[in-house]
């Protein structure tokens, strides 16, 4: 069985109800809806980074390589479970985590500059 068919099979366990589209217009609408959900979830995750910057008492705690690897391992395991391509997930997460670390440092510094 090809890898994309394995991914498709695993995707059936996801709670998000993916539609079977018959036209490109329908498919594009579906992708646009998914993008809106993804952006909303990214906004929630960004809020978590803001909270982390408030909670952490030391700027040296912002970058935690052990936590980075823990997150990547968890999302790769979940990717396998739901049929997402592991290379895509790892690349996106590593880039997102790096952005989040930089953002958290900016928020951390900004919060302390105002004190």
Image (spheres, grey):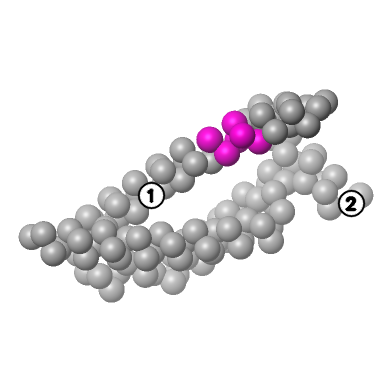
Q: What element carries label 1?
A: helix
- Residue 14 visible? The answer is no
Residue 54 placed where, x, y %? 22, 55
Please report the bounds of the magenta region as a residue range.
31-37
**Residue nearer the viewer, 111 or 1:** 111
Q: Which numbered disc flags the more N-terminal residue, 1 or 2?
A: 2
Assign the magenta stretch its main secondary structure. Answer: helix
User: Mark 1 — residue?
Assistant: 46
Residue shown at 11% from the left, 59% from the top: 114
Residue 14 placed where, x, y %? 65, 35
Quick one: label 1, few (<14), some, or many (20+) residues within 10 Å? some
User: Mark 2 — residue?
Assistant: 2
Image height check: is 20 above or below 52? above
Q: Distance between the residues labelled 1 and 2?
A: 36 Å
Q: Does the magenta stretch include residue 72?
A: no
**Residue nearer the viewer, 59 or 99:** 99
Task: Give the number of the mark in front: 1 or 2.
Answer: 1
Residue shown at 52% from the left, 63% from the top: 95
Seen as rendered, the residue at the extreme right is: 1
Residue 2 placed where, x, y %? 89, 51
Left or right of residue 66, residue 6 in this image:
right
- Residue 88 visible? The answer is yes
Quick one: label 2, few (<14), some, or many (20+) residues within 10 Å? few
Image height check: is 97 above or below 46? below
Left or right of residue 21, residue 73 in this image:
left
Disc sitting over residue 59 in the figure: none
Residue 39 placed where, x, y %? 49, 41
């Amino acid at each position: 069985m090809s890898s994309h068919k394995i991914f498709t099979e695993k995707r059936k366990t996801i709670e998000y109800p993916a539609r079977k589209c018959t036209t490109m217009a329908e498919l594009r609408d579906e992708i646009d809806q998914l993008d809106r959900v993804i952006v909303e979830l990214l906004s929630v995750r960004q809020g978590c980074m803001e909270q982390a910057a408030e909670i952490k008492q030391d700027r040296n705690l912002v970058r935690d390589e052990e936590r980075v690897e823990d997150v990547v391992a968890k999302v790769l395991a979940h990717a396998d479970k739901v049929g997402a391509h592991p290379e895509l997930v790892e690349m996106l997460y590593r880039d997102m985590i790096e952005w989040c670390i930089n953002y958290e440092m900016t928020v951390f510094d900004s919060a302390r500059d105002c004190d």
